[in-house]
Amino acid sequence: MTMRDHVLPRVHPWALAQYDARVLDPDSDLRPAGSDPWSGGLAPTAYRRSTLLVSGLPGGRAAGTVERLRGVVEQRGLAVTLDVDPRDEAVEKRTGELEGDLRELVDRLYRTRVLLTPASDGPSRPVDAWEILLAARAELGTEVEVDLEHLMLACPDGTDDASAGPAKAAGGTKDGGTGGVIPLEVQPQGYWESHGTKPGPKPQGYWESHIADLGGGRAADGAAPQDAEKQQPQGYWESHRVSHPDARTPRGDAQAGASTGEQGWGTQGYWESHGYWESHGGTGSAGVAPRTPVALVVADPAPRDRPKSRTPVVAVPDTGLGPHPWFGDASRSLVTRTLAGFPLAVPPGPDPETVGVEDDLVGLRAPKSGHGTFVAGVVRQTAPSARLLALPVLDISGAAAEGDVHQALVALLVGHCIAQDASSPDLSADGTVVDVLSMSLGFYHQSATLLTAHPVLDLLRAFADRGVVVVAAVGNDSTRRPLYPAAWAHGPGRPEHKDLPVLAVGALNPDGRSVATFSNSGPWVTAFREGVHVVSTLPCLDASARPAIALEADGHPRATVDPDDLRGGFGVWSGTSFATPVLAGRLAGRLHAAGAEDVRPQAMVERAWKGLDEELGWTT
């Protein structure tokens, strides 16, 4: 167990507000009873204060549990009202139109959202779902099918979080009052200003030497610092240390590398994460470029001719799919907000794929805008013949309520079953047979031990039973904490059971051999694929940042690169988010080569195992 195994979820402050969410603090929040398995260890998790998730449909399996929860609240004298989310009642109505087996499947796998509101109209403290959950587990037993509604987060490396502007992703010391987190403190500076960590008599320009000032600086009289080695100038491509004494680690301690020279939270390569107008401080990975526009001079790899037989479908629950020439053909790529008659929840805020900016007063590109389009482009490059089904579940900050993602996956499974039973080859919102489910998102649970049972795991097993391969990102926090659903993977070897396993994917550096330092680790990691400085598609949009130099000369416009002008349609980005579709796409390519016409469950399972054995080098 290391300090990195207690990592805090990195959640944008905007997302915390939008979802009425907070970060559980195991040190100061209410703790489970001694008989509760969770009492053996809690871990930080981001969850919604005012909702709980109950297994089953409102009028089905969930009904009895909801009534028992109301009884607990009344018995404990808690001034809280419990109501079923009306959207779940609409889901139940649609479920009633399905055939018997599918109705039972939905009731078994669905999760109803229970809304928690103060019972008093007067002043009251905020409702906390965590306290109500612990009361329910104490009164009803730990097997009660109720849990927090976690925030699920996209998995690009943190280098993009600050590059979008002043509203940084939360990460750092805990804010015991709100359950939020305080960003690391760094010395701010303009993009073209000095890259030193303290204002000094001689600031440096973009092209000048970047002093590695660890606090020595210059004395007031201009004398040389006591430790000359700490003032060695660095070249353009070298590390820009920002380890000034005021910096803080995520736990609030003095910066780890300040005295040892080790690479710590405040040490970053030139291409490390920082806002366009901000300093190089932050929590990203040294040497990893932020999301950056690039030029790609290759054509859309998709075949020009229409396929004569069914081709595999890769489903991507993400931010959606933005405008791009590669995805203009609806027969090859479909983005939908309804599936099998179930409406999907609309994430709050601006559309991350068609608007892409988080603040209309500043207009800078949002941290995760274009995330889904980037993932889709990786699938297109690795499986040109595969079709894409994009489900917009993540908001512009890369977050989603767990219940909304769960609902979308249940709808996806129902549509898969309907199309599978009808042997339909179509890519349609009414129902589509899915070959690979690529999930570049996940959540940390409050249990410090690995979960062996969970409703999301039950849902993924149902996909596997129907022949769908599930591929998930392991996360980018340099931790061994289980990030779900990836942590439910079997690991690097071929499992002995016959059920298709969840695959957990970590990120490799461009050398194809070394693992990226940001990539999470653990015995569940199945494989590693390219995930650093990946080139892929981004929505063809521009935001408010401008080139630092722009002029007319000799009859031509001349300029430095505009950092958020993505109208060229391509960029470079990093994260296990993008290693995941590399594996998903390559698997889809192998399924296509094997022939994807037969969509009966057993045929799809056998075809999937063959593809897994080939791609991962497994032997029976």
Image: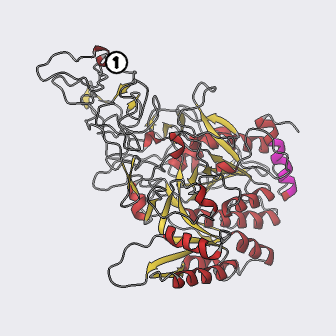
* Nearer to us in this view, 430 or 552: 430
Q: What residue is rendered at 87% in x and 53% in y?
A: 603
At numbered mark 1, what does the secondary structure look like: helix, strand or loop?
loop
Q: Which residues are magenta?
A: 602-611
* Quadrant of res 133: bottom right
- Judge whether 488 appears above or below 97 on screen: above
According to the image, what is the colour scheme of the structure?
secondary structure
* Nearer to us in this view, 329 or 599: 599
- Judge whether 114 appears above or below 616 on screen: below
Residue 159, percent across and down?
44, 39
Which quadrant of the rendered structure holds the N terminus?
top right
Magenta segment: does it hold 610?
Answer: yes
Q: What residue is rendered at 86% in x and 49% in y?
A: 606
- Judge whether 498 appears above or below 382 on screen: below
* Nearer to us in this view, 472 or 601: 472
Which quadrant of the rendered structure holds the C terminus?
top right
- Residue type at numbered disc 1: Gln
Label 1, on which residue?
234
Residue 390, percent across and down?
60, 55
Q: Residues within 10 Å of mark 1 (few under 14, many from 20)?
A: some
Magenta segment: does it hold 594?
Answer: no
